[in-house]
Image (tube, rainbow, N blue to C red):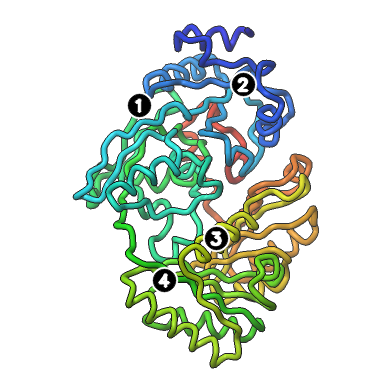
């Protein structure tokens, strides 16, 4: 065991909680190397079992100026910029206990390493759920979801990760444990650190515990699929946005994605309604009528067929097809979504927010072309996953705003030694 690994094992008191780099499985080494630069491997990966052990590890890292890459299960460790000179990887996957589920208050508090799927199973026993739909839901941890602001189509009805986050506990860069927010829905005090930490990619602190608001499980669900010409899909989306209908999910799909899912031809609009049975049926039929008037092909999916459709949709957008795949998160004005989708093969954009996901097969020039198009529509394109060589050549974040100096000052305040996930965030922060 190398010197750093031995030191950390003595702090935690368990050699089994510290794995030297050479002892890691090849697949684990490869996954970590996809997010670090240069390709010099870290000394070890550390698995603290408690929040206090996590704090002790970060305290020692701060004292020795060791650079730390924090993660959960590692399902999104390759997202964002390349981390610089990582000395240790710290995984919170064993800090995973349920702290409190206040059923009547519709809140839940868990440690950051709990798997999303495990939390949903716990909530389902009380007919409640966390209204997020992250990538790789079977692997994603709660802390990782917050750190990367990872949610999808459910933002149509429930908003983003930060909209549902009520409180966090985190370990600062100096190893001190700090808290923000609380366990009640109404909580206003000082700076909104919860919003600051959401999507910060572990650069400000390592999240160890979170409190979310939760929602009752809906009684019934149904999904309407409309496919056809770009003009008709644009009109259908505009009509839906301006209507009294209340979908929980509504996504615009590219032509190839529609074909891959066997939904028909042309672009697609996939809309999910969840409520009482009568409401779901009524809203589904009304949207189907809108599509028929516009000459679109339409169908309603329910029960097992509906669940399969949304599962296959997620698999198409989040399963890496080849090593050259470039996955990108975008945001544009909702009215420009269809124009963007006509320029790509695989793409999905949320109808109301204009946020979405695009996939390219090694087409670096096409990525830059679409980024420019997004920026022309008051939007952005950020590279999530790509080969290391692509991330070394292209600006992963492509940030053109004027807040970079503010972000750097915040980083300086939270992590003056620059030891936490250095390089992963905007501007190399």
Task: Give residue 338's quadrant in the image.
Answer: bottom right
Mark 4 vs mark 2, CA separation in Å:
48 Å
Mark drawn on residue 87: 2
Q: Where is residue 327 in the image (x, y as percent from the top left)?
A: 67, 53
| Depth order, front residue of 244/168 | 244
Q: Which residue is drawn at 43% across and 85% down?
A: 286
| Depth order, front residue of 355/373 | 355
Mark 3 vs mark 1, CA separation in Å:
42 Å
Circle 2 residues within 10 Å: few <14, some 14–19, many ≥20: many
- Mark 4 touching mark 2, by CB under 8 A? no
Q: Can residue 115 be seen in the rendering of this structure?
A: yes
- Mark 3 touching mark 1, by CB under 8 A? no
| Badge 3 or badge 4: first in the primary sequence | 4
Circle 4 residues within 10 Å: few <14, some 14–19, many ≥20: many
Residue picked out by circle 4: 273
User: Left or right: where does residue 270 sit relative to residue 376?
Assistant: left
Task: Give residue 254's quadrant in the image.
Answer: bottom right
| Secondary structure at numbered mark 3 | helix
| Secondary structure at numbered mark 2 | loop
Q: Position of residue 142 (x, y in %)?
A: 43, 41
Residue picked out by circle 1: 177
- Mark 2 touching mark 1, by CB under 8 A? no
Q: Which residue is drawn at 69% across and 63% down?
A: 346
Q: Can residue 429 be seen in the rendering of this structure?
A: no
Q: Position of residue 152 (x, y in %)?
A: 51, 57
Q: Which residue is drawn at 63% across and 34% down?
A: 83
- Mark 3 touching mark 4, by CB under 8 A? no
Q: Where is residue 34 in the image (x, y as percent from the top left)?
A: 70, 36
Residue with the most extreme front position: 304
User: Left or right: where does residue 227 sit relative to residue 277?
Assistant: right
Residue picked out by circle 3: 308
């Amino acid at each position: 065991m190398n010197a750093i690994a031995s030191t950390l094992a003595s702090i935690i008191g368990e050699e089994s909680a510290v794995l030297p780099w050479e002892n890691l499985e090849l697949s684990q080494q490869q996954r970590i190397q996809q997010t670090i630069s240069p390709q010099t491997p870290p000394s070890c990966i550390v698995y603290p079992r408690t929040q206090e052990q996590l704090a002790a590890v970060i305290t020692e890292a701060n004292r020795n100026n060791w650079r730390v890459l924090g993660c959960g299960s590692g399902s999104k460790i390759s997202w964002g910029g390349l981390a610089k000179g990582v000395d240790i990887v710290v995984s919170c996957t064993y800090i995973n206990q349920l702290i409190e589920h206040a059923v009547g208050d519709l809140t839940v508090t868990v440690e950051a390493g709990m798997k999303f799927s495990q939390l949903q199973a716990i909530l389902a026993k009380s007919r409640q759920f966390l209204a997020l739909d992250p990538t790789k839901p079977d692997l994603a941890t709660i802390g990782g979801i917050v750190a990367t602001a990872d949610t999808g189509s459910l933002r149509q009805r429930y908003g983003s990760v930060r909209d549902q986050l009520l409180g966090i506990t985190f370990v600062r860069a100096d190893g001190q444990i700090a808290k923000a927010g609380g366990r009640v829905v109404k909580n206003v005090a000082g700076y909104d650190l919860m919003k600051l930490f959401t999507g910060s990619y572990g650069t400000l602190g390592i999240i160890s515990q979170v409190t979310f608001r939760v929602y009752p499980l809906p009684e019934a669900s149904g999904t309407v699929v409309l496919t056809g010409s770009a003009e008709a899909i644009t009109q259908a989306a505009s009509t839906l946005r301006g209507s009294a209908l209340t979908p929980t999910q509504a996504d615009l799909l590219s032509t190839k994605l529609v074909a891959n899912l066997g939904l028909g031809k042309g672009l697609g609009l996939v809309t999910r309604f969840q409520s009482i049975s009568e409401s779901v049926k009524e809203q589904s039929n009304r949207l189907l009528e809108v599509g028929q008037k516009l000459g679109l092909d339409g169908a309603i999916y329910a029960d097992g067929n509906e669940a399969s459709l949304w599962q296959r949709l997620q698999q198409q957008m989040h399963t890496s097809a080849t090593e050259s795949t470039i996955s990108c998160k975008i945001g544009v004005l909702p009215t420009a979504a269809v124009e963007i989708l006509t320029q790509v093969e695989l793409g999905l954009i949320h109808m109301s927010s204009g946020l979405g996901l695009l996939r390219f097969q090694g087409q670096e020039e096409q990525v830059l072309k679409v980024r420019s198009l997004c920026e022309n529509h008051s939007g952005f394109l950020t590279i999530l996953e790509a080969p290391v060589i692509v991330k070394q050549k292209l600006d992963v974040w492509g940030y053109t705003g004027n807040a970079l100096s503010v972000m750097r000052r915040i980083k300086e305040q939270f992590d003056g030694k620059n030891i936490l996930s250095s390089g992963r965030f905007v501007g190399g922060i």
